[in-house]
Amino acid sequence: MHLVKLFALYAVLFTTLAAFAMLVTQVSLEGDHFVFVGLVLFLAAIAAVVVTSRHASANKWDATDDMAERMTGSKR
């Protein structure tokens, strides 16, 4: 269950970063840009999976784990 919480934290982080990058570069959801937006969101999800797996393999509790627990409303 904790891995799902970590993935959710990283997915929110990377999706927010992707949305900010699209805002700065003025990418809209119209026309051909829709495919680009989908690709960026897909890459954000892949990045979240990779970072979650690397974090879990470290097998060490840190502040990121605390943030994931607090984000979902539960406590350690």
Image (cartoon, rainbow, N blue to C red):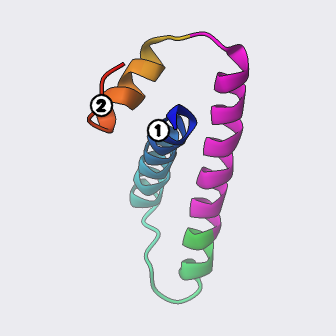
Q: Residue at x 46, y 60 (%)?
A: 22
Predominant secondary structure in magenta? helix
Task: Specify whether residue 52 is painted magenta.
Answer: yes
Residue at 64% in and 24% down: 55
10 and 68: which is toward the camera: 68
Q: Which residue is mark 2?
A: 74
Q: Are marks 1 and 2 in contact (CB under 8 Å)?
A: yes
For residue 70, above or below residue 32: above
* Amino acid carrying mark 1 in the image: Lys
| Location of residue 51 in the rendering, given as x and y in whole percent from the top left corner | 65, 33
Sequence-wise first label, 1 or 2: 1
Q: Position of residue 5 (x, y in %)?
A: 47, 38
Query: Could you classify mark 2 by the number of other residues whose Cα lies within 10 Å: few (under 14), some (14-19), or many (20 or more)?
Result: few
Left or right, 65 with reference to 76: right
* Numbered disc 1: secondary structure: helix
Quadrant holding the C terminus: top left
Task: State the mark number for residue 5.
Answer: 1
Span of residues in magenta = 39-60
57 relative to 30, above or below: above
Depth check: 26 or 58 in front? 58
Residue 22 in magenta stretch: no
Q: Viewed as shown, does residue 28 lie left or right of 48? A: left
Which residue is pictured at 49% across the width and 11% down the height?
62
Q: Residue at x 30, y 31 (%)?
A: 74
Percent position of residue 20, x then y: 40, 51
Q: Which mark is residue 60?
A: none
Distance, label 1 to label 2, CA atoms, is 10 Å
Q: Amino acid at mark 2?
A: Ser
Give above or below for 63 relative to 73. above
